[in-house]
């Protein structure tokens, strides 16, 4: 027995540091909930039930301060423009998606920024050095990809790598884009980034459950609208936030394609407040008005 324990200890000490770190990671609750009970389906929003009153999904104010306190277990998602959203936690942590270096006339320094480099409008080579965590959606070597698992206590940020079609120098780049997932207040919030292809079964499994999805709906620079709509219907998140559009025509086509299975809400504001308890019973597409920050 002593020899067995000694051997086990030696094997553990011999593990690479990365493997030990992985073993000590806080697991993703978005994947754990989806996989914990094989044969039992976790709750998805129903297409047949009516959408709840708007007040349950977001707060009435349309001109909030981006520094105001949030209720417990509530996350604010603010559309800054193009593919950038500001995510705020009840405890005051902030994350900006597809960060380009400018979020508005503000001195706010996000705690986390994520970036993708399919196009220059989704990243910056010179992020503010005061930002504690800069997460690039690509690896240092072309096609190598990257893995993130950033645990900030109140927020867990992880990624699923996907391929870029016709990237730099006209070449496809394997694992050059990342879908980032933010786990906070019990919610699973996904940002599809510059997604260029239908995710594989392994990628869908790695995403797990998503309650909120930020999806590009340009219809060409990323994915054809029919394909993007198929992705969103497969994910069946409770809330879909369209982003990355260039014309009212693509928005109209996207709206029509989603209207059979999703409720449609036009919100004359740049943000929504979401909590796990108040997710709509029917999956809902919410159109936000982009607006940069101003102090």
Image (cartoon, rainbow, N blue to C red):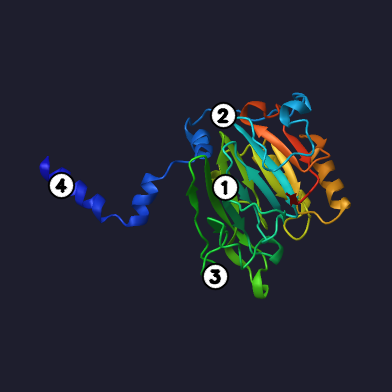
Q: Earlier in the sequence, mark 2 or mark 3?
A: 2
Which residue corresponds to the image point at 65% horizontal and 50% vertical from the top-left? Answer: 192
Mark 4–mark 3 Cα distance, whole angstroms, equals 42 Å
Question: Crowdedness of circle 1 by 10 Å Cα count: few (<14), some, many (20+)?
Answer: few
What's the mark number on residue 201? 1
> Considering the numbered disc 1 on the image, is that residue within a helix, a strand or a loop?
helix
Mark 1–mark 4 Cα distance, whole angstroms, equals 40 Å
Residue 70 sits in quarter: top right
Question: Crowdedness of circle 4 by 10 Å Cα count: few (<14), some, many (20+)?
Answer: few
> Considering the numbered disc 3 on the image, is that residue within a helix, a strand or a loop?
loop
In this rendering, the count of numbered labels is: 4
What's the mark number on residue 6? 4
Which residue corresponds to the image point at 53% horizontal and 55% vertical from the top-left? Answer: 133
Q: Nearer the viewer, mark 3 or mark 1?
A: 3
> Considering the numbered disc 2 on the image, is that residue within a helix, a strand or a loop?
loop
What's the mark number on residue 41? 2
The N terminus - image quarter: top left
**Discs 2, 4 touching: Cβ within 8 Å:** no
């Amino acid at each position: 027995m002593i020899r067995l324990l000694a051997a086990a200890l030696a094997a553990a000490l011999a593990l690479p540091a990365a493997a030990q770190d992985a073993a000590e990671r806080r697991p993703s609750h978005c994947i754990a909930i989806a996989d914990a009970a094989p044969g039992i389906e976790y709750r998805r929003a129903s297409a047949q039930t009516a959408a709840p009153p708007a007040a349950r999904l977001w707060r009435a104010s349309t001109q909030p301060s981006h520094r105001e306190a949030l209720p417990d277990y509530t996350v604010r998602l603010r559309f800054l423009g193009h593919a950038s959203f500001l995510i705020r936690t009840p405890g005051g942590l902030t994350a900006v998606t597809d960060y380009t270096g400018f979020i508005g006339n503000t001195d706010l320094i996000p705690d986390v920024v994520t970036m993708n480099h399919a196009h220059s409008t989704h990243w910056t080579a010179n992020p503010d050095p005061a930002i504690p965590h800069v997460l690039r959606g690509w690896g240092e070597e072309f096609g190598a990809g990257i893995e993130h698992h950033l645990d900030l206590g109140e927020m867990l940020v992880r990624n699923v790598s996907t391929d870029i079609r016709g990237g730099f120098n006209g070449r496809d780049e394997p694992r050059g884009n990342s879908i980032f997932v933010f786990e906070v207040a019990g919610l699973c919030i996904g940002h599809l980034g510059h997604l260029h292809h239908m995710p594989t079964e392994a990628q869908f499994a790695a995403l797990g459950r998503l309650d909120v999805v930020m999806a590009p709906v340009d219809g060409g620079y990323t994915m054809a609208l029919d394909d993007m709509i198929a992705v969103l219907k497969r994910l069946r998140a409770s809330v879909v936030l369209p982003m990355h559009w260039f014309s009212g025509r693509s928005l109209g086509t996207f709206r029509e394609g989603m209207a059979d299975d999703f409720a449609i809400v036009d919100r004359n504001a740049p943000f929504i407040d979401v909590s796990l308890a108040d997710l709509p019973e029917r999956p809902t597409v919410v159109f936000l008005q982009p607006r940069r920050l101003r102090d």
